[in-house]
Image: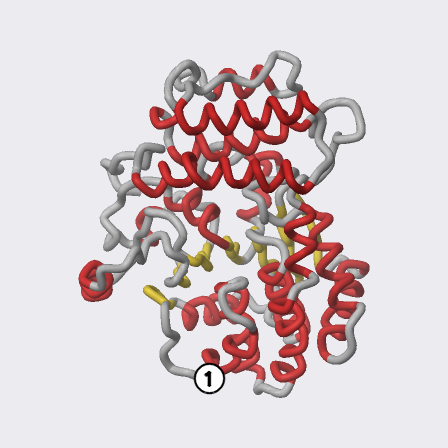
Amino acid sequence: MTDQAPAIISTDSPFATDVFVKRHPALIERILGAWPLGPEQHHALRKLAEENVSGFMEPLPASAPDADQWRAWGRDYYGKPWTAAPFLWAESFFYRRLLNAVGYFGEGVWQGLDLFAPFKQAELAGEVVAAEVEALDDVADLAKDDRGQALLLSSLWGNRADLSFQIQAGRSSENSGLVADDSDQLWKLLEAARGGTLAIVADNAGSELIADLALIDHLLTAGTVGEVVLYVKPAPYYVSDAMVADVGDCLRKLLTVDGAARGVGERLREAAANERLHVRTDPFFCAPFDFTAMPDNLRAQLASASATILKGDLNYRRLVGDRWWDPTVPFGEVTSYFPGAVAALRTLKSDVAVGLEPGTLAALEASGTTWRTAGTHALIQVS
């Protein structure tokens, strides 16, 4: 990594401020509207919303099971405005406070309940997933390389566009919206380690996880990889992040339809039974730090894989460091610490960016768009 890393992105950046002042209170209102929460939970949630907008950051109550750990982690930030903390840290702490406000880790009926399940299930039952599942019939008719590229792009874009769009994009030499495209390098990397273990750190549930599972099935069926380890979050996080239960929900979705999708589901179920597909998690995936701080056990697991694919914007921020990098700094330079070959599949939804060509950056800056945060651009980067 570079000798002098740039400043950490703080919560007072315009995009981060919008997250805390608008998006977090709106999310709390959605939660209050989705569940029959009691008065104490209402009070705690509204207090958190007000604190995000104009108050001072408070630590977890001493009764929380991990209170001491979080008090140590946040000792430099408590008692100060949320804007004084790094964006990545503060956003993670918001979700930990959110779970505490409803009693996720306490005794009682709310223990272990995924507050975001109604939103995830609505997406699974929606038109985007229905079209995506149906389009798997068309994907099955493609040549192997075209099929792999279409599924890779679908996994990249998540719910931005349905799989039918990605089928056409997979046949095209240029993929609209990609600010960096190392997909050829990714396929060469996987082929070079053919039959090895691929680690995939998932991002969103719903349509994106359906696409991830379809890609995993393709890689296993084609023999490109011998086994896949799919990492998910251990607790509800960032609204739509995938947990073990979401993997089950998506698998059942595939198994309850006709056509190619059912075949994907059946092969994945068999792969899990034969220990070619593993679903794992780790507490670190909900920690407020980048991947330079990953624990030794997780580092060893990723080091043992032939390659690791990190999905989504949050994992990208944690991979490269949520800093004001010069966007042309090489991706391989800022990820050199990672224990093995690594690829990022990310739709841009936050400020950080690295690995862009100068001409690409100039065109993006001249476009007058919020290309860093709007979710209209994406990248595939490999080191």
- Residue plotted at (73% across, 35% down): 36
Residue ID for mark 1: 171
- Residue 288 vs 226, above or below: the answer is above
Q: Is residue 65 left or right of residue 161?
A: right
Q: Is residue 76 left or right of residue 190?
A: left
Task: State the residue in front, 128 or 278.
Answer: 128
- Residue 147 in picture, x, y percent from top left: 56, 79
Answer few, some or many: residues within 10 Å of disc 1's Cα (few below 14, many 20 plus, some between 14 and 19): some
Q: Position of residue 60 (x, y in %)?
A: 56, 18
Q: Number of numbered discs present?
A: 1
Q: Nearer the viewer, residue 201 or 129?
A: 129
Front residue of this view, candidates 188 and 38: 38
Q: Residue at x 58, y 27 (%)?
A: 45
Q: Quadrant of the N terminus?
A: top left
Q: Residue 36 or 134: which is nearer the viewer?
A: 36
Question: In this orientation, does residue 230 appear?
Answer: yes
**Which quadrant does the C terminus fall into?**
bottom left
Q: Secondary structure at mark 1?
A: helix
Identify the residue at image location x=42%, y=40%: 19
